[in-house]
Image: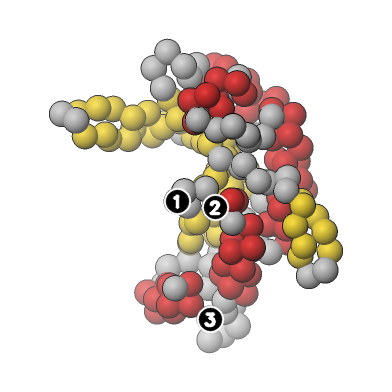
Amino acid sequence: GVETSIQIADQTGIHTVSISGGEPTLFPRRLMDTLKQLSTAKKNDGEPIFDMIALHTQGTMLLKNIDLDGEMMPLATALGRLGLTHISISRVSADEEIDRTVRRMNKGLSNDNLKHAIHLLQAGGTDVRLYCELLPDITDIADMVNFAKELGVTKVLFSELFNINGLHDEKRIT
């Protein structure tokens, strides 16, 4: 579990941790409990074990109101309070309908709500990146860069999937 991972990280000098897989924001309580454990983990000298705690997400539930220590707030606000230092939010298109269709999502954040969530994250001290999955005939790099600018995001990561003999390989451009 998380406690064992923290112990191994401390013993081996790992100081960066990333949470991903599926959609972590679909389980806000579990995500918040994990963040709390990671952000409060200390070395023997009292210093934090992790200097970077990152989350990779589609951002589906970032504006969902949750209870943090008896106070209701959007999940985006709670994440910053719990020590999240970096977040990468995935999109395939600046057009929210295309993005939802490609991801087969009935719901998700509208562009306006995404902008609001990013503002909350940044206000809480979380560094925000837009993670763009490049898909042929769907994703336009210039549109995504402009979209990031509209959102107030200054860091964009592009990832392209290549099909090589039936295997997928990623090429990343930052």
Q: Which residue is mark 2?
A: 24
User: Is 170 on the left or on the right of 23, as rendered?
Assistant: left
Q: Nearer the viewer, residue 23 or 13?
A: 23
Report if the CB atoms under discs 2 and 1 are less than 8 Å apart. yes
- Give the alpha-carbon distance from disc 1 to disc 3, as whole Å: 27 Å
The label number, if any, that marks residue 43 in the structure image? 3
Q: Dot 2: what SS?
A: helix
Amino acid type, callout 2: Pro
Question: Which tag is nearer the camera, tag 1 or tag 3?
Answer: 1
Q: Which residue is mark 1?
A: 21
The quarter of the displayed image where residue 82 is located: bottom right
Report if the CB atoms under discs 1 and 3 are less than 8 Å apart. no
- Give the alpha-carbon distance from disc 2 to disc 1, as whole Å: 7 Å
User: Is 52 on the left or on the right of 77, as rendered?
Assistant: left
Identify the residue at image location x=52%, y=24%.
101
- Give the alpha-carbon distance from disc 3 to disc 2, as whole Å: 26 Å
Amino acid type, callout 3: Lys
